[in-house]
Image: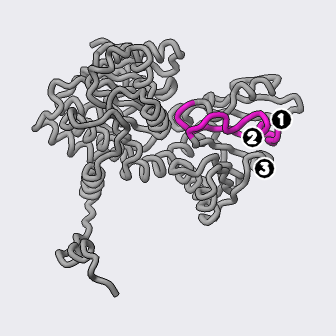
Amino acid sequence: MDCDVRDLGLAEKGRGRIDWASREMKVLSLIRERFEKERPLAGIRVAACLHVTTETANLLATLRAGGAEVAVCASNPLSTQDDVAAALCDQDGIDTYAIRGEDQETYYGHIRSVLDHHPHVTMDDGADLVSTLHKERPDQVAEVIGGTEETTTGVIRLRAMAQDGALGYPIVAVNDARTKHLFDNRFGTGQSTIDGIVRATNLLLAGRVVVVCGYGMCGRGVASRARGLGARVVVTEVSPVVALEAAMEGYEVLPLRAAARTGEIFVTVTGDTSVIRGEHLEAMKDGAVLANSGHFDVEIDRKALEELSVERRRIREHVDEYRMPDGRRISLLAEGRLVNLAAAEGHPAAVMDMSFANQALCVEWIVKQRSALEKAVHTVPGDIDDEVARLKLQSMGIDIDELTPEQEAYLRSWEHGT
């Protein structure tokens, strides 16, 4: 195999953890069983730029079961699990380019290595793969029949590309599937973010003021989990409607400039840049902790933090302490990168099961619809969303009701009234 991983000797350890995750990914297992029989992806080359984790390994195995040839690189320099990367290369026959802690040059070099496989389908998490392909290899774009995008940040970038007329092939916004953003973003990000903060700091959240910047699905998850552990949660928002929702959920809603003075732990989950800036850092009290769970490391202004401080030291693994001229200490977790993946293991496998089931089924759909799709960002077909939910319920042993013929007729009719 053509691979660039840290140590192939870690493969056995990675195999055990991949198998452990597979027990929680029952929807993907059901899809894999069908793929093995039908081989819907035979002859298709897939290039994936995803977090190289145990859950991703199970997705890639499903694609291979469907007949695809797969190559994968990391979508974040700090999210790779080196033992998983080793197992993918050494045991699963997947060309893997991912090393935890890789520098930016290596990161983009790995993206180019995946593109060297001349994919028919791209799978992205943040749109770095797609943007690199369009910027550096425009002649290769025509070889791609379609792609998928996993996260909010990537969908935003891709819609901007489509708006500018720069998107060269159709891409399905997996992030926007109901069985993805209602569960992965909320329950997955909520639990894994708190997990990353606690692993990095070993702080007690009960009684602390946790400021959640952004109240989208990810922010809702973080806020609810922090409150469940006894934290006093403050929400900051720019959308009046979303801020109103947070207030009616019982959270204190403040501008960040006000929350900065009382907050003890700050979590950014907006998908935007420069959320926590110098003006906020100057107002924070001694001991403030900063964490980011947005896809890119741009939500906390690290340059401002460097310029305002007089000393920085690595005080714990994943914790950098910055000392201000007045003696205040502000700690940044995981270098401002995804704290749930850099300082922990990311989302639980059971919730990634639904996200990656969407990925697998959308790749199959793209292959089947290859000649009918416009060069645009597409929503996940409703029948795929429903199928993922149905399989998830089946795996949980849950039955639900069905509409009677009379009820179906009533819902189709305009003549029935009071």
Q: Amino acid at mark 2?
A: Ala
- Answer whether residue 273 is visible to the viewer in this image: yes
Residue for badge 3 = 258
Looking at the figure, which quarter contains the N terminus?
top left
Per the image, label 3 sits on a secondary structure element best described as helix
- Residue 323 in which image quadrant: top right
Q: Callout 3 environment at 10 Å: few (<14), some (14 to 19), or many (20+)?
A: some
Image side of residue 266 versus residue 166, left or right: right
Count of labels in the image: 3
- 194 in magenta: no
On residue 328, which mark appears? 1
> Among all residues in the image, which is located at the extreme left?
37
User: Tag 2: Cα neighbours inside 10 Å, few (<14), some, or many (≥20)?
Assistant: many
Q: Secondary structure at mark 1?
A: loop
Looking at the image, residue 85 lies above or below residue 184: above
> Which is more N-terminal, label 3 or label 2?
3
Give the residues in magenta.
Answer: 271-296
Q: Is residue 16 visible?
A: no
Task: Answer with mark 2 or mark 1, whichever residue precedes in sequence.
Answer: 2
